[in-house]
Image: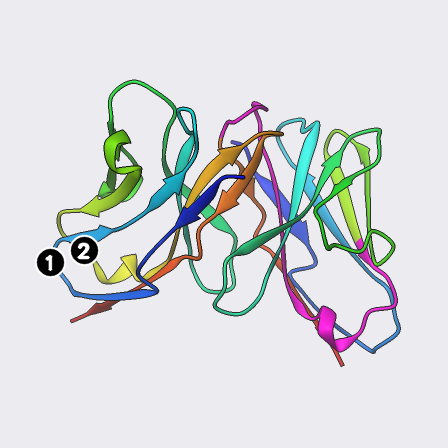
Amino acid sequence: GAVVSQHPSWVICKSGTSVKIECRSLDFQATTMFWYRQFPKQSLMLMATSNEGSKATYEQGVEKDKFLINHASLTLSTLTVTSAHPEDSSFYICSASDRGGYQPQHFGDGTRLSIL
Amino acid sequence: AQSVTQPDIHITVSEGASLELRCNYSYGATPYLFWYVQSPGQGLQLLLKYFSGDTLVQGIKGFEAEFKRSQSSFNLRKPSVHWSDAAEYFCAVGEAGFKTIFGAGTRLFVKA
């Protein structure tokens, strides 16, 4: 149980395009989901907290107009990288907790985004 | 703000040898602590967690961790490492707002 699915797993696109990444909790409802960015050989950096039915909470330094987050239902959150540029290339991972609070997060398998 | 320090960027151990990965945290109250493992190109898998109670925590895949408040540490151990344990290991702490703050990670190499 407690599976988080992330799609796509890998995407390559041209500079200037927008890319949408989906994060789904398959067998539980998630009021809150988290989006992370991971650079090669580095740790996970929390980008934003996605809240169902309300605006996302972004971490300091993360451009909310660049990284649009929508949490339309209790099982789906999306991250849209708008007008993507090569510097946006990274590994993006989402997570959710099936119990809320400080319970451990369940992670998606990540999306590798490459902007040419 | 809370922080997590993993002093070792990478560690190499021989297969069958014991393993200890170090983790130190800074937090005023009793922390919520986690160890996760990440294989290349994949998400993270929870190995174990500490919320309260017994300071020696057992996890999956034969891992255990010990919470030592006096040392602000939560080191991960395994008595006998297998080649399949080669991966990146992250120590993490739960922060206000139910966020998870990760350490920089320790890459484990296992030699035959």
Residue B66 can be seen, yes or no: no
Residue B95 position by quadrant: top right
Q: Which residue sits at x=19%, y=47%?
A: B78
Q: Please name the colour scheme applied to the rendered image.
A: rainbow
Q: Earlier in the sequence, mark 2 or mark 1?
A: 1
Mark 1 element type: loop
Q: Amino acid at mark 2?
A: Val
Q: Identify which residue is drawn at 84% across, 59% down.
A: A66
Q: Give the chain of mark 1.
A: B
In magenta, the rendered stretch is: A80-103
Asked if residue A96 lies in the magenta stretch, the reply is yes
Q: Residue at x 76, y 81 (%)?
A: A116
Residue sitting farthest toward the bottom: A116
Q: Give the answer, above or below, for where B97 lies relative to A43.
A: above
Pinpoint residue B70: horizontal percent, then vertical percent: 24, 32
Q: Is residue B47 visible?
A: yes
Label 2 – label 1 distance at C-alpha:
6 Å
Q: Is disc 2 in contact with disc 1, using a CB cutoff of under 8 Å?
A: yes
The residue that mark 1 highlights is B17
Residue A22 image offset from top left, x and y in percent: 74, 49
Q: Secondary structure at mark 2?
A: loop
Which dot marks residue B81? 2
Front one among B2 and B74: B2
B44 left or right of A95 in image: left
Confirm whether circles 2 and 1 share one chain.
yes
